[in-house]
Structure formats: C-alpha cells, structure tokens
Amino acid sequence: MNNRTFAMIKPDAVRNGHMGKILDRIIEADFKILGAKLIRMTKAQAEGFYAIHRERPFFQELTTFMSSGKTMVLALEKDDAVSAWRDTIGATNPSEAADGTIRKDFATSLGENAVHGADSDENSVIEIGFFFTNNELISNQ
Ligand code: CMP
C-alpha cells in the first residue's frame, strides 16, 4: 500500500472558481499536501500525461481541454492515499458520483470532471514523477 497519490484540479474547476473550495476538501479529508503547482499544461504535456488513453476516441478532446487553462497539480499523502482520494473525488462521470464527493459538487461533465486521481499505487508514482522532482516534495510537515 502506498501513502501517496497524485491529484489535479482541472481547468474547468479553476475557471469556475472552485480551486480554493477543492483545496479545503483536500485539507478537511486529512491529506497532507507534499507538493502543489499551478501550471498551464502544454498540449504535448497533456498528451504525454494521458498517453495511456491515446487510442481512445476522446483523446483529442481530453488533451485539448487539459491544455486549455490552468491546472493545479498536487502530490498528496495519507494512509492508503490512492483509494482515499478516489473516495473523496467520486466516480469519473459526475452523474454517477456519490453525494458529498468533489465531482458531485463541482464537475460539469464526464470530460470536464473537475479533478483527477491516480488509479493505482504504481501510476501514482509515475504521475507524481511527471510533474515533481523528489526534492520538491515536502514531507516533514
Ligand atoms: P481522469 O480521471 O482525469 O482520467 C482520464 C479522463 O478522461 C477522465 O478523468 C475523464 O475526464 C476523461 N474521459 C473519460 N471518458 C471520457 C469520454 N467518454 N469522453 C470524454 N472524456 C472522457
């Protein structure tokens, strides 16, 4: 079990003024923020990050959206972080997300679903490494 996960507050949520409210949810759910950056992803970065989906019909839509505005990328720490964060954000499709989850409250559609969470311990390591170097992660809070 890993105690770290990778999260993003996506361009729709930043544009809609939800970044602060989502950060509050992260803190209220007892995650430690090891690293956080506000970035504007390039199309090439988005294509690299989501390379696993490159054969999917929504790949262009996804990478155009993810490079359309500011994203906050975060490295989070908590016991069983991957599954704890996935519980906090809710189902990928906001119409299926449980009450009280971030996607239920802030996402607008499957494509513009407010937040991202790594889906496994293995991917959390890869995804944190995509945006952070080891010495950018502050673990002695
Ligand atoms: P995320 O958790 O960031 O991982 C991949 C993303 O692809 C997912 O959230 C959705 O936002 C997006 N996605 C998945 N399925 C579709 C779809 N059918 N159409 C558009 N976007 C999708």
Image (cartoon, rainbow, N blue to C red):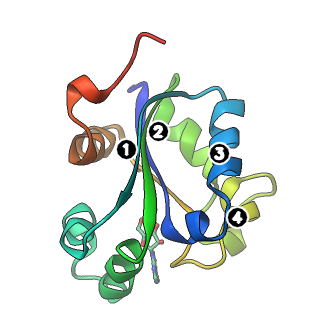
Could you tell me residue 58's position as x and y percent?
37, 86
What mark, if any, has residue 88 been given in the picture? Answer: 3
Q: Which residue is mark 2?
A: 82
The quarter of the image holding the N terminus is top left
**Quarter location, residue 99:** bottom right
From what the image shows, is residue 12 above or below residue 18?
A: below
State the separation of the CA atoms marked 3 and 1: 15 Å
Left or right, 11 with reference to 109: left
Could you tell me residue 50's position as x and y percent?
27, 66
What mark, if any, has residue 81 been given in the picture? Answer: none
Residue 92 in sight: no
**Residue at the image position 65 percent from the left and 45 percent from the top:** 88
Mark 3 or mark 2: which comes first in sequence?
2
**Quarter location, residue 44:** bottom left
Q: Nearer the viewer, mark 4 or mark 1?
A: 4
Some atom of ligand 1 lies within 8 Å of the CB belonging to the residue at label 1: no
Mark 2 or mark 1: which comes first in sequence?
2
Crowding at mark 3 (Cα within 10 Å: few <14, some 14-19, many 20+): some
Q: Secondary structure at mark 2?
A: helix
Do labels 2 and 1 touch, CB within 8 Å? Answer: yes
Q: Which residue is mark 1?
A: 120
State the separation of the CA atoms marked 2 and 4: 20 Å
State the separation of the CA atoms marked 3 and 2: 10 Å
Quarter, ligand 1 = bottom left
Could you tell me residue 38's position as x and y percent?
42, 51
Q: Name the amino acid, label 2.
A: Val
**Quarter location, residue 93:** bottom right
Q: Which of the two residues, 7 or 54, is positioned nearer the viewer here? A: 7
Count of marks placed on residues:
4
Q: Name the amino acid, label 3.
A: Thr
Crowding at mark 1 (Cα within 10 Å: few <14, some 14-19, many 20+): some
Q: Secondary structure at mark 3?
A: helix
